[in-house]
């Protein structure tokens, strides 16, 4: 079996070493990086070839890429990197990775042109000053070949293992049987529709009643489609942790039904939930699980790959056994899982992990969006932002000296908004993000960038919070168009103002995410009206609509209205006895499981206490304040 890999992917897999370093430092945008490459090309003149396509083979591996620049007259190959801040502050393992890429390109060029030696150059371009720093080394073709083959050997050992896993996975999925004796009413219709959508490379909106087994009804057929449609990954996205639990229940059932099933599932959780040392910074000088992370990652990755069900706890156990960070081990294993279970954010957020990995690796992806009626509001929130005048004022009083002048300019810009306020001074709609305020905000963000460039070891917590909030506002301001609402709210009595950039129609921002996947299924018990959801979510025009009939009979539903009971706030204390009588009478008439919903914890506690006093033999479980997700 043959394999193809990009130079960058080969080096990131086989050449990374040293500490994990996630300290925030300003980095060039993609546009700034492109501008740096264009700058170097212009400076070098006509004698330099840019974007030189290179390819070479070793054993059954083909390595491809484009070298940034080749100057034949001097025999120099250039690898261009842009940066912000002080070059001396760049971690050593980042520099080592850059050299690995340059040497790999160097060997491919030597092989292609028959060169015996070459000069390699790392060209670092300072985005702010446009100055360049050039690091060079002379290398023989023989030395470059040896380094190249060592990288390829490390990559091939893993690639061959993964190819064997992929073949076994597909064979097992072809033979996989439904894990129940029969389908529930409506479940077969759903499963057939999901499978058909995958065969036709289409998107499916499936409205199906609660209780028919939607999760297995979507998961099973999409897994069955993986071999025939050559799907690399299945991404199961949820709005809440309860949805993830249902996905894991279905996956465990499949593994129980088919022991030894070679299907690797990975759970992605938020970093705050996976962090073992929340009191430490995420770099090797602070956190023991970040120190030497990349040195220990290969062994941790190898062990993790033998575990078919890598949920949060399984990842944690493997990570701690190898002294690596559980969160970033999970991020790594997202590359190698067959089924990825995670929050909507991992697919739809501005800087989402999963679509980036899919694009880098050219994956074919099948998507399941659970409880999809939540996606409109969640997507709106992903692309909305707000800036508080009060928070800015609090920061100004404690801000370090280097940030006070930019914050003063921001405060003056904010005062210009007073002229735009409505007469009632509470809510005003603006035509667009206020240009002067956004410009002043970006000036403050640049001040933070400049400070980080000279002091790359972190920020005070309040400054960092302002910085991230400001970045979000600045990014959303660039997106604002007719699908956004910009408003200014003023709260009484303090008169605190908040600038809100609210996304109302996320469709244009979500549309590329749907286009990038092979097939997608949106599941919910309520997706009516379908045209509304299709339009606001930016779904493809040929999206299929399925409304699974309810398996329940009308006779199974009883509705009783207690008109004599008022649950208004002023009547709640008096209503408790009546509510208790109603609950007890219903249970006595037909014992079973019932849910009683209340508008507040206080009201719930009053009724539950009274119920236990009046009917101590009636089994009651109550929700507690600040109850965890489990």
Image (spheres, grey):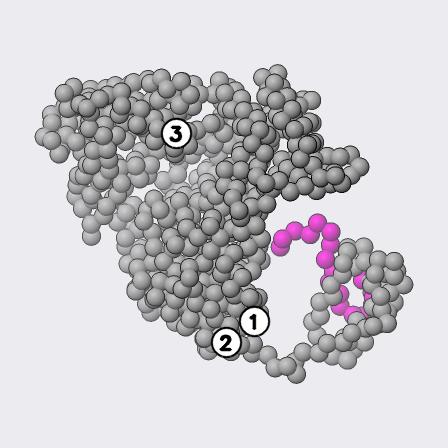
The label shown at residue 32 is 3
Crowd band around label 3 with a 10 angstrom C-alpha radius: few (<14), some (14–19), many (20+): some
Give the magenta part as a residue range.
Answer: 608-630
User: Which residue ends up furthest to the right in the rendered image?
Assistant: 574
Is any part of residue 342 visible from this angle? no
Residue at x 46% of width, y 78% of height: 182
Crowd band around label 1 with a 10 angstrom C-alpha radius: few (<14), some (14–19), many (20+): many
**Drawn side of residue 76 relative to residue 546, left or right:** left
Contact between labelled residues 3 and 1, with CB atoms less than 8 Å apart: no
The CA span between labels 1 and 2 is: 9 Å
Predominant SS along the magenta part: loop
Residue 505, given in percent of the width and then of the height, sits at 53, 51
Contact between labelled residues 2 and 1, with CB atoms less than 8 Å apart: yes
- Dot 1 falls on a residue whose secondary structure is loop
The CA span between labels 1 and 3 is: 50 Å
Disc 2 marks which residue? 186
Disc 1 marks which residue? 209
**Drawn side of residue 456 relative to residue 87, left or right:** right
The front one of 253 and 38 is: 38
**Drawn side of residue 68 relative to residue 234, left or right:** left
Residue 75, given in percent of the width and then of the height, sits at 16, 22
The front one of 280 and 247 is: 247
Residue 511, given in percent of the width and then of the height, sits at 44, 52
Q: Quadrant of residue 502?
A: top right
Residue at x 26% of width, y 37% of height: 7
Is any part of residue 60 visible from this angle? yes
């Amino acid at each position: 079996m043959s394999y193809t890999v990009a130079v960058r992917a080969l080096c990131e897999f086989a050449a990374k070493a040293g500490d994990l370093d996630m300290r925030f430092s300003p980095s060039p945008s993609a546009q700034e990086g492109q501008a740096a490459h264009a700058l170097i090309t212009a400076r070098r003149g006509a004698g330099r070839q840019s974007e030189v396509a290179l390819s070479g083979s070793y054993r059954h591996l083909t390595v491809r890429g484009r070298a940034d620049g080749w100057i034949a007259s001097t025999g120099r190959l250039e690898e261009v990197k842009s940066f912000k801040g002080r070059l001396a502050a760049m971690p050593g393992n980042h520099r080592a990775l850059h050299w690995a890429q340059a040497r790999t390109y160097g060997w491919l060029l030597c092989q292609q042109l028959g060169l015996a030696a070459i000069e390699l150059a790392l060209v670092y371009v300072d985005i702010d000053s446009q100055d360049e720093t050039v690091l060079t080394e002379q290398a023989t073709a023989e030395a470059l070949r040896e380094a190249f083959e060592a990288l390829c050997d490390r990559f091939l050992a893993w690639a061959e293992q993964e190819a064997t896993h992929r073949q076994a996975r597909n064979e097992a999925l072809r033979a996989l049987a439904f894990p129940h004796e029969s389908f529930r009413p409506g479940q077969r219709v759903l499963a057939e529709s999901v499978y058909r959508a995958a065969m036709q490379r289409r998107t499916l909106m499936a409205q199906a009643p609660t209780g028919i087994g939607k999760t297995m009804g979507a998961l099973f057929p999409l897994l069955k489609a993986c071999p025939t449609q050559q799907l690399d990954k299945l991404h199961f996205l949820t709005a809440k942790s309860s949805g993830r639990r249902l996905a894991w229940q279905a996956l465990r059932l499949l593994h129980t039904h088919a022991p030894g099933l070679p299907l690797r599932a990975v759970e992605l959780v938020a970093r705050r939930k996976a962090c073992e040392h929340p009191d430490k910074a995420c770099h090797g000088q602070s956190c023991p699980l970040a120190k030497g992370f990349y040195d220990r990652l290969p062994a941790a990755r190898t062990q993790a790959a033998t575990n078919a069900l890598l949920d949060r706890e399984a990842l944690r156990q493997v990570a701690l056994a190898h002294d690596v960070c559980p969160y970033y081990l999970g991020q790594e294993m997202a590359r190698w899982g067959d089924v990825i279970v995670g929050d909507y954010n991992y697919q739809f957020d501005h800087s989402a992990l999963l679509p980036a990995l899919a694009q880098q690796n050219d994956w074919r992806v099948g998507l399941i969006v659970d409880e999809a009626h939540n996606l409109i509001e969640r997507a709106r929130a992903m692309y909305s932002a707000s800036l508080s005048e009060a928070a800015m004022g609090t920061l100004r009083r404690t801000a370090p000296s280097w940030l006070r002048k930019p914050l003063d300019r921001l405060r003056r810009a904010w005062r210009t908004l007073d002229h735009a306020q409505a007469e009632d001074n509470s809510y005003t709609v603006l035509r667009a993000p206020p240009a002067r305020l956004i410009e002043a905000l970006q000036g403050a963000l640049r001040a933070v960038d400049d400070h980080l460039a000279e002091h790359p070891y972190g920020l005070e917590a309040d400054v960092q919070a302002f910085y991230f909030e400001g970045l979000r506002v600045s990014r959303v301001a660039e997106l604002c168009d007719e699908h956004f609402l910009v408003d200014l709210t003023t709260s009484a009595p303090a008169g605190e103002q908040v600038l809100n950039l609210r996304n109302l129609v996320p469709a244009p921002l979500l549309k590329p995410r749907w286009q990038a996947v092979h097939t997608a299924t949106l599941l919910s018990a309520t997706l009516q009206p379908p045209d509304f959801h299709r339009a606001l979510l930016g779904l493809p025009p040929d999206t299929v609509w399925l409304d699974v009939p309810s398996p329940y009979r009308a006779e199974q539903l009883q509705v009783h209205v207690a008109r004599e009971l008022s649950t208004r706030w002023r009547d709640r204390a008096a209503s408790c006895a009546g509510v208790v009588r109603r609950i007890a009478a219903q249970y006595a008439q037909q014992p079973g499981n019932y849910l009683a919903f209340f508008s507040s914890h206080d009201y719930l506690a009053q009724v539950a206490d009274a119920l236990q006093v009046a009917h101590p033999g009636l089994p009651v479980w109550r929700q507690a304040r600040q109850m965890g997700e489990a």
